[in-house]
Amino acid sequence: MTEGRVALITGAAQGIGFAIARRLSAAGVHTVITDVNAKVSSSFEELRQSYPENNGFAAQMDVTKKAEIDKVVSDVVDRYGHIDILINNAGILPQALLLETTEEMWDLTMNVNVKSVFLCSQAVLPHMIRQKSGVIVNTASQAGKFAEPGIPAYSTSKAAVIRLTQAMAHEMVQHNIRVNCVCPGATDTALLGSVFSDRSVVLGVTADEMRQDIVSQVPMGRLAVPDDIAKVVAFLASDDSAYMTAQAINVTGGRVWY
Ligand SMILES: NC(=O)c1ccc[n+]([C@@H]2O[C@H](COP(=O)([O-])OP(=O)(O)OC[C@H]3O[C@@H](n4cnc5c(N)ncnc54)[C@H](O)[C@@H]3O)[C@@H](O)[C@H]2O)c1
């Protein structure tokens, strides 16, 4: 149902973003994968080996830089004539208690996690409005639904992503554009590795204790794997979710139900 569509995915060199690229490729979507990390090119080559019919490309793009975003979006539209799916997935998770959070950490977290959603969506939406169709899926977090010690900037940024999702959804519904977000729980990626190593130091526990504590809070008793999240994103990007917009869907193994 999504065959032949074109998707732009941010933060897709690895982790959840790359798993989303795999799922969308499997559904016949041409995926333009972007990341600030130059590794995005080799990630795309890996993707092409599994999905040779994927006619997308890789672009190094920093989601905090409007000029870079505008250039990639214009390249996509020049090449395909349309842009159907935007996945705002790039994110960072700095670890620090509130009083140790520097102004630089705060600004960087807000820029990478929230302002990026605003900038990328603002670049893509005029094309979707012209097409009278489009889908945006944002990667928020369970941390946007409740707060925990050690990640005040991150929790605030992800709560903002949920509200921005709803604001965009309500403005765009008249243009046949749907906007939803996923709220993943603890997912086994490099980002979570930094939670175990760095947040354990912030909270004064060992990395193993940190991991056990996180897993013990998940009713399903395990961490998510990136594909657990990607499957739900692929559903939200497809016509199977045609009657859904403005939603923040938990993918947390039962950890969050609100
Ligand atoms: N892993 C988890 O437990 C978890 C839980 C909830 C939400 N999330 C969210 O999922 C998303 C993906 O995270 P992940 O776990 O796959 O982490 P990850 O670190 O494996 O991947 C994040 C990617 O974003 C890229 N990125 C960082 N800053 C960027 C920038 N300025 N411009 C462009 N790309 C940038 C990184 O290079 C990296 O490839 C993030 O938004 C994260 O907040 C993750």
Image (cartoon, rainbow, N blue to C red):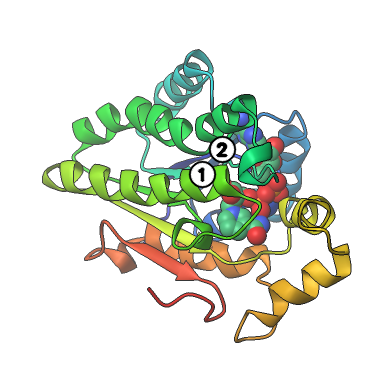
Front-most of residues 171 and 95:
95
Q: Residue furthest left?
A: 174
| Residue 213 falls left or right of residue 89 | right
Q: Is residue 114 left or right of residue 208?
A: left
In terms of image quadrants, where is residue 187?
bottom right
Whether residue 15 is visible: yes
Residue at label 2?
A: 56
Quarter of the rendering containing residue 252: bottom right
Image position of 71 (left or right of 178): right
Residue found at x 40% / y 66%:
249
Q: Which residue is mark 1?
A: 30
> What residue do we see at 33% from left, 43% from top?
164
Q: Which mark is residue 235?
A: none
Is 57 above or below relative to 155? above
Ligand 1 within 8 Å of the CB at mark 2: no
Confirm whether residue 47 shows in the render: no
Image spot of residue 182 (x, y percent): 45, 60
Estimate the x, y position of residue 21 in percent, counting from the top left.
Answer: 59, 51
Q: Where residue 246 sits in the image (x, y, percent)? A: 27, 56
Separation of residues labelled 1 and 2 (CA atoms): 5 Å
User: Considering only order in the chain, which callout, 2 or 1, is on the residue closer to the N terminus?
Assistant: 1
The kind of residue on which mark 2 rests is: Gly
- Decide: marks 1, 2 in contact (CB < 8 A)? yes
Q: Residue at x 58, y 41 (%)?
A: 90
Residue density around tag 2, few if under 14, some if 14–19, many if 20 or more, within 10 Å: many
Q: Give the side of residue 32 with respect to residue 187, left or right.
A: left
For image coordinates 83% across by 58% down, the residue present is 204
Amino acid under disc 1: His
Nearer to the camera, 108 or 135: 108
Q: Position of residue 211 (x, y in %)?
A: 79, 70
How many numbered marks are there? 2
Are there few (<14), some (14-19), or many (20+) residues within 10 Å of tag 1? many
